[in-house]
Image (spheres, helix red, strand yellow):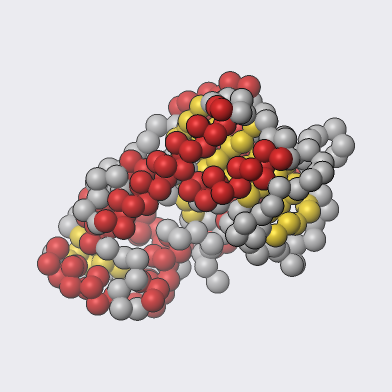
Amino acid sequence: MDEWPTIGVLGANSLVGECVIQRLGKEGRHTVAFSRYPSTGNTKVGVTWRRLPASLPTPPKVPPIKEWLCVAPIWVFPQYFSMIEAFGARRVVALSSTSLFVKKDSSDQSEQHIAYRLAEGERALRAWAEARRVEWVILRPTLIYGRGRDRNLTEIVRFVRRWGFFPLLGQAEGLRQPVHAEDVAMACVSALTVHAAANQTYNLSGGGTLSYREMVGRTFDVLGKVPRLVTIPRWLFKLAVTALCLLPRYRYWTVEMAERMNRDLVFDHADAARDLGFSPRSFVLLAEDLPA
């Protein structure tokens, strides 16, 4: 373990953070895992947990941590720049999202705001890192799924379990490339050390492309249910979303989300494959990827 430098991980309790820590552990690397809610049940060898307060003072004397992964939302990263600088950061890898492009021109203001925050987070990271000669890498995954903890397919699964069907707007033939959280974690770890990745941005898309309709259909398959995909017109979908938003679980659903069912959201990951050895699996939804 002493042969490898310690890795700092921000957002360690997130889905990708969990996968990153496991991958680093398999490589025998020591991780200092930072989170607002440190894990109390995770006592794995090689992992030291640290709590992130809203405002963290600069530590006077700390062991150096030169390599950092931020798998928390990239827009929160700037508030910890002074902390990681004090630890002697020399390379930082941050997780952004292809939503930066997808939601930029959304008709929904809240989605536009997400795209803006992603863009600002990326801009702030580049500016800070370049001013201090710290190497940076930005990774933009597509729709992340896995381990029943994602906020994408798990919501579809929960809807199907509760209602027994899933509503689709039109033919829902827009193409998708779901990427498993473990494959994203692999790219994160690789980006820490690959020389060619310094000061680069990469898209991380899944290893297979399928329509939104087919993606939803596969959730029925893994649940052992006959697919019941109900096509409804836009006006009715709008009414349904308005009603569903009254329920806490569906408060983030929008008509714009439904409109995207018919848009292709496809991103090339050839650069990540070349530089990071990124080789994502095809989309196969397994029982372990379902929420409890």
Height in image: 206 above or below 192? Answer: below
Height in image: 224 above or below 142? Answer: below
Q: Nearer the viewer, residue 17 or 198?
A: 198
Q: Estimate the x, y position of residue 150 in percent, counting from the top left.
A: 50, 59
The image quadrant of residue 104 is: top left
Residue 201, visible in the rendered structure: yes
Residue 292 relative to residue 210: left or right? right
Q: Residue at x 71, y 47 (%)?
A: 58
Q: Nearer the viewer, residue 21 or 86?
A: 86
Q: Estimate the x, y position of residue 72 in percent, counting from the top left.
A: 55, 51
Residue 277, visible in the rendered structure: no
Quadrant in which the N terminus is drawn: top right
Q: Residue at x 55, y 40 (%)?
A: 94
Q: Residue at x 71, y 63 (%)?
A: 39
Residue 86 relative to residue 133: left or right? right
Residue most toward the right? 2
Height in image: 291 above or below 281? Answer: below
Residue 71 relative to residue 31: left or right? left
Q: Estimate the x, y position of residue 238 in percent, counting from the top left.
A: 18, 68
The image quadrant of residue 270 is: top left
